[in-house]
Image: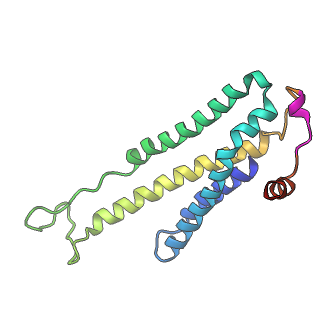
C-alpha cells in the first residue's frame, strides 16, 4: 500500500513540473509509467488485503467492495476532468476573424484557447496530485501491515516472499 501510494504521488507530481515541451513530454510519460506500475499493485491488492484483514466468510464481500471502490475512482476521474477542463471551442467566426481578442495563427491554432486549456489541464493535475498526496499521507501515517489480531488461521500463516514465490511458479 505504501509503495503504491508513493508511486501514484510521484507519478502525479512529475506531470505538474512543467508544460513546456520536450521536458513535459518526458515527465508526463514517466509519471504515467509510475502510475501504471502502481496500477499493477492496485489490481492485485484486493485478494491479498481481504485474506490478511478479513475472516473467510467475509473475504468475497471485502474483495468485491475493494474492487468496486477502485472502479468508482476511475469513474470519478472521468467526471472531474470535464468539470475542470472545458471542451474546445473555436474562437474565430466563419470568416476567420478574431473573437474575444484572439487572432488565429496561420497554422489554424488558437493561442488563447491553447493557453486557457493548458492552464485548466495543469489545474486538474494539481488537484490530482493534491489528492494523491493526501492519500499517501494517510497511508503512511495510518495503514498497518496487518491487524492486531489475525481474523483467521490462514491470515496468521507466514507468507512466502515474492522472489521465492516467483521462482516456485517458474519451476
Residue nearest the viewer, comparing 113 with 71: 71
Magenta span of residues: 153-159
Residue 89, placed above or below residue 70: below
Percent position of residue 92, x then y: 16, 63
Q: Is residue 6 left or right of residue 100?
A: right
Q: Position of residue 75 (x, y in %)?
A: 48, 40
- Answer with left or right where residue 30 lies relative to residue 139: left
Residue beneath the point at 74% across and 46% down: 1
Q: Nearer the viewer, residue 167 or 10?
A: 167
Tell which residue pokes out farthest to the front in this image. 171
Please give the name of the residue rendered at 83% of the width and 52% of the height, measured from the top-left corner: 165
Q: Position of residue 140 (x, y in %)?
A: 77, 46
Extreme-left residue of the structure: 95
In this orientation, which residue lies closer to the viewer: 154 or 29? 154
How many marks overall? 0
- The residue closer to the viewer here, 35 or 13, is 35
At 9% from the left and 62% from the top, the residue drawn is 94
Examine the structure image and report whether residue 157 is included in the region drawn in magenta: yes
User: In the image, is residue 153 above or below residue 49?
Assistant: above
On the image, which quarter does residue 50 sit in?
top right
Picture layout, residue 149 above or below residue 3: above
Asked whether the viewer can see residue 131, the reply is yes
Residue 151 pos. (x, y %): 85, 26
Task: Tell me the residue at 75%/37% (across/down).
Answer: 49
Amino acid at each position: 500500500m505504501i509503495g503504491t501510494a508513493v508511486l501514484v504521488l510521484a507519478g502525479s507530481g512529475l506531470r505538474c513540473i512543467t508544460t513546456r515541451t520536450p521536458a513535459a513530454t518526458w515527465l508526463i510519460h514517466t509519471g504515467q509509467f509510475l502510475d501504471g506500475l502502481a496500477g499493477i499493485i492496485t489490481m492485485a491488492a484486493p485478494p491479498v488485503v481481504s485474506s490478511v484483514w478479513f475472516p473467510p466468510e467475509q473475504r468475497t464481500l471485502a474483495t468485491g467492495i475493494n474492487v468496486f471502490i477502485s472502479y468508482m475512482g476511475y469513474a470519478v476521474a472521468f467526471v472531474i476532468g470535464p468539470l475542470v477542463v472545458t471542451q474546445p471551442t473555436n474562437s474565430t467566426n466563419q470568416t476567420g476573424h478574431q473573437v474575444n481578442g484572439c487572432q488565429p495563427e496561420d497554422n489554424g491554432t488558437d493561442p488563447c484557447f491553447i493557453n486557457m486549456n493548458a492552464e485548466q489541464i495543469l489545474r486538474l493535475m494539481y488537484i490530482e496530485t493534491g489528492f494523491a498526496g493526501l492519500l499517501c499521507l494517510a497511508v503512511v501515517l495510518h495503514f498497518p501491515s496487518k491487524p492486531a489480531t489475525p481474523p483467521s488461521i490462514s491470515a496468521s500463516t507466514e507468507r512466502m516472499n515474492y522472489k521465492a514465490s516467483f521462482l516456485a511458479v517458474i519451476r
